[in-house]
Image (cartoon, helix red, strand yellow):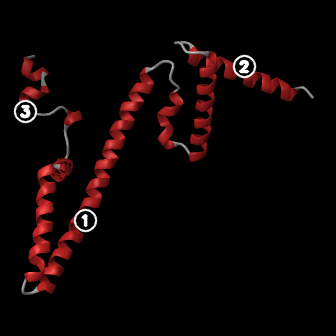
Amino acid sequence: MSDEDRDPSSSGVRPTSERVSWGEHVAQLATRFVADSRVHWVAVLVVIAWNVTGPRVADWTAAYEWIEQVVASLSFLMLFLLQRSQNKDTLSLQLKLDELIASNPRASNRVLVAEDISEEELVRMRRHFRLLDRLAREAGEGPLAEENAYRRHEEEQRLQAEQKREP
């Protein structure tokens, strides 16, 4: 087997994990284009030019309707482009956090699916982690403070359960 057979980039073909659809490619280009500072300044100049020359145009109504349609169309398209970009950024960030959580043996894997659980469960988990934080602070600083907090929390839960059983 030659080096070219082993290395997908040498053949000019991207690895499967890096392939993007035509639509994805267009969306990426559009996102980069719109985010470019030069495009921002062009838009500013267009607005200034429109405000200066607009009233001087002979057929003001037609020009106004035309620019109104252009702005409405661009706004509609930008809504979807921005939402797509935001969703992709959020997913990317979520995956990075998931990897960090999964790679830490002391981390709670329950939070890996936090975006898929109900709001009530999120609130309950938040209270739990606030309690652990408080207990860790009370236990003192150090590498075992979090583990001490878990132990203290479990001990408190055990004592509460025992107290409930005793009439």
Residue type at mark 1 is Ser
Disc 2 designates what residue?
Answer: 155
Quarter where residue 167 is shown: top right
Q: Residues within 10 Å of mark 1 (few under 14, many from 20)?
A: few
Residue at the limit of the structure toward the front, as seen here: 52
Circle 3 — which element? loop
Disc 1 designates what residue?
Answer: 75
Q: Earlier in the sequence, mark 3 or mark 2?
A: 3
Residue type at mark 3 is Gly
Quick check: 39 above or below 166? below
Q: Are marks 2 and 1 in contact (CB under 8 Å)?
A: no
Q: Residue at x 15, y 61 (%)?
A: 44
Circle 2 — which element? helix
Residue 12 numbered mark, or none: 3
Cα distance in 3D space between marks 3 and 2: 60 Å
Q: Nearer the viewer, residue 2 or 62?
A: 62
Q: Residue at x 32, y 48 (%)?
A: 86
Q: Are marks 3 and 1 in contact (CB under 8 Å)?
A: no
